[in-house]
Image (cartoon, helix red, strand yellow):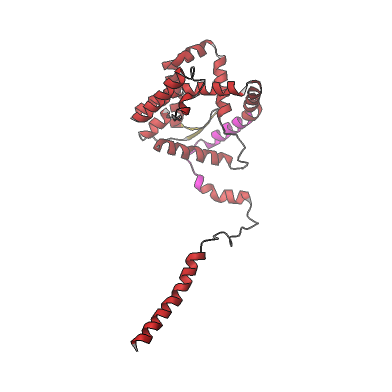
Amino acid sequence: MRRPMNRLLLASALLLALPLASAQQYEFTRPLERLTFSDELEQYQFERATLGALKVSDPLEQLNRRIYHFNYKFDQHVFLPTVRTYRKVTPRPLRSGISNAYANLKEVPTIANSLLQLKGKRAMHSTARLLFNSIFGVAGLWDVASKMGLEPVKEDFGQTLGHYGVPPGPYLMLPFLGPSSLRDTGGLVTDFLLERDINWLDYPETSRRQPALYGLEVIDTRHTTELRYGQLNSPFEYEKIRYIYIKARELQIRD
């Protein structure tokens, strides 16, 4: 009597195991096969539904939006045409050398802010980049440090303040410069003064005598900045840029 009962239990267990094995084999192999989208859902409806997740402290939003639109117009009618002309008249190797030279000067605030944040390895890393590129790269025209495995890193005074718990404060859209915050705007000013005070390779002193170098630096900065107003093709671009900037800064501070 016990043997037929055991066979019955074994058969029942096998029958129950078959659907489970089948499910494990096929259940998630085509997860999107039956997924459908409503044709009635327009892009703007989808974006409106996500705006709640893009909330950022912006008490000066009305002013910021005006500056945003000014930046958009200035970018379209002045900045980008100037950059396009610069690219046409300046050979690629020379453009690359100019960008490398200005990037080399930015190592100075990176070193200082790495030390302020007690990031010794990062300070040594950026110091090595500054010395190698300044000496072997002929004042930074060639980025020989990257070819040696020393990739560029960036630390600014806004990150230093954030590292020590200073909140970003209200979001700001700066004329010409774009998205920022009260904390990061103060950081920009501090880093600018630091670069000028240290006077590495005598560039700050030379640029005071030759103001055209400031103009070249501004053009190069826009040339190397990927942000293009209107590229998101969205009526909510202002909110998206604001959110992306704030979240990116949070990640940079944690790094």
Is 65 left, or right, of 107 in this rendering? right
Q: Is residue 69 highlighted in magenta?
A: yes
State which quarter of the image contains the C terminus: top left
Establish if 50 lies above or below 61.
below
Q: Is residue 248 visible?
A: yes
Between residues 177 and 135, which one lies in front from this camera angle? 135
Residue 66 part of the magenta segment: yes
Which image quadrant is residue 214 in? top right
Residue occupying the point 60% across, 30% down = 70
Magenta-drawn segment: 53-73
Furthest-front residue in view? 3
Q: Is residue 117 visible?
A: no
Q: Quadrant of residue 129?
A: top left
Residue 175 lies, with reference to residue 50, above or below; the image says above
Image spot of residue 152 (x, y percent): 46, 29
- Which secondary structure is most common in the magenta stretch? helix
Q: How many marks?
A: 0
Quadrant, the N terminus: bottom left
